[in-house]
Image: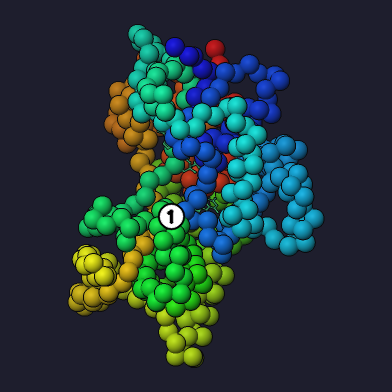
Amino acid sequence: MKTYDLVGIGFGPSNLALAALLEEKRFNTKLRAVFFEKKKTFSWHPEMLMGNANMQISFLKDIATLRNPSSPYTFLNYLHKIGRLEFFANLASFYPSRIEFSDYFSWVAKQLENYVEYSTEVIDIIPHGKAPHNMLELTIKNPEGYTTVLAKNIVVATGSIPSIPSNLNLDDDKSRIWHSSKNLEHLEKYKKTPLNSYRFCVVGAGQSAAEIVLDLHQTFPNATIYNLQRGFGFKPADDSKFVNEIFTKSNMDLFYNAPESIKEQLLSKHRDTNYSVVDAELINQLYQIKYAESVTGRTRLYFNKFSQLDFVQYSPSYIQANVKDLLNESINKLKVDAIILATGYKKKRIPPMIVQLSNLFSKTSITDTNVTRGHQLITSPKLLAGIYLQGFNEDRHGLADGLLSLISIRAQEIFNALRVN
Ligand SMILES: Cc1cc2nc3c(=O)[nH]c(=O)nc-3n(C[C@H](O)[C@H](O)[C@H](O)COP(=O)(O)OP(=O)(O)OC[C@H]3O[C@@H](n4cnc5c(N)ncnc54)[C@H](O)[C@@H]3O)c2cc1C
């Protein structure tokens, strides 16, 4: 059985940042490391790479710069190597397009190919041997079948899963109703006839919903777009300077050490830095369109406020969105060609793949499970192997945990905390 000092599970930006750091350190460590990624190749939210979408963080918060500005894996070095640095400088922007940032991630991933096994899914993790367990045993599935490997440390960075309202079932008709995480794949067939008078319904009022609405409006010049929102309208993301300091290492330290009740208050008070909010410039852009259409009288973008998708009926030539008006509980019927659910993502507090190890966690209940500042799950003395979590610690490390801002620094913190003997 192959034995590793470190197994990374998932190869998105979080573990990419860790692999970059390992590569930088390879001359002074002899760490045997591998990353397993279930996708065939590296990609970063490929179904939401619309031409109009920009990053919501500064390019300086790439996978390396804040940790080591002279790393070969910085965004600036990427620009330099591909010959776009001067022109990017001329843009005078801190916010590259998501297409460009995704290309940057892929460029880094290509250089770190030796660290990763693609088309490889971790499907089970159990303690190895007798207690105290020094190693974890991982069952992986790859194109050759099933195999097991041993790990002294695992770093779980498996991301979040699409959140679908419980009253809806996407299996009913996947080609006509889909989640934003599958957006571009499903739009392909509509793009073959872009001039058709499609009717699209987009559910949600967050960043993804706003981006999809704009993209549909631009891509399909004769389409009608309905955007269902529960409230009055899009709310702007708070990216003001003082508040944005939430996404710094020192404020993660403060948050981590704060009393539980204060943590809850802070998370709730500053949710609007990330959740159910939209970039202010994009809100303005959409409002301009709405206003311009009211002037010309050729309206094809409708914002349906106080509206909630209740249920969907399917017929061969259209699908009917039955939309509840939250003010008077009446149901409005919308006949459309497709429904896109921009209804966000969810994440469990403990990654499902390690829940079965929970009798070895140091806790009184699964929800009491705690994590060190170095992102290591605190285990009982019976489990000595290290389990590190990336992106599952928002309630313990604060709002930066699920975002890109601190991934370079987090990689260093995990590296420092690794159990190497
Ligand atoms: C459309 C969109 C735009 C965003 N834009 C920004 C932004 O501008 N700024 C920002 O800070 N944040 C942004 N985010 C937040 C997002 O969480 C981060 O961008 C980032 O993707 C988190 O990286 P990650 O590596 O932790 O998780 P992911 O990127 O989700 O990667 C997880 C990886 O794990 C793999 N995986 C899952 N389970 C297994 C398994 N069992 N075995 C093997 N592999 C597995 C998955 O295939 C995936 O590749 C955005 C999110 C979305 C959805």
Where does the C terminus fall, quadrant-wise?
Answer: top right
- The residue under label 1 is 185
Residue 384 visible (yes or no): no
The answer to whether residue 172 is above or below residue 319 is: above
Write the residue at 74% across / 47% down: 82
How are the residues colored?
A: rainbow
Tell me the quarter of the picture where residue 239 sits.
Answer: bottom right
Residue 73, horizontal then vertical, whole percent? 68, 39
Please state which of residues 298 and 192 is positioned toward the viewer in this rendering. 192
Please state which of residues 207 and 2 is positioned toward the viewer in this rendering. 2
Please state which of residues 419 and 373 is positioned toward the viewer in this rendering. 419
Q: Residues within 10 Å of mark 1 (few under 14, many from 20)?
A: some
Query: Residue pushed farthest front?
Result: 192
Write the residue at 32% across / 69% down: 337
Write the residue at 53% across / 18% down: 5
Where does the N terminus fall, quadrant-wise?
Answer: top left
The answer to whether residue 249 is above or below residue 384 is: below
Write the residue at 60% across / 44% down: 105
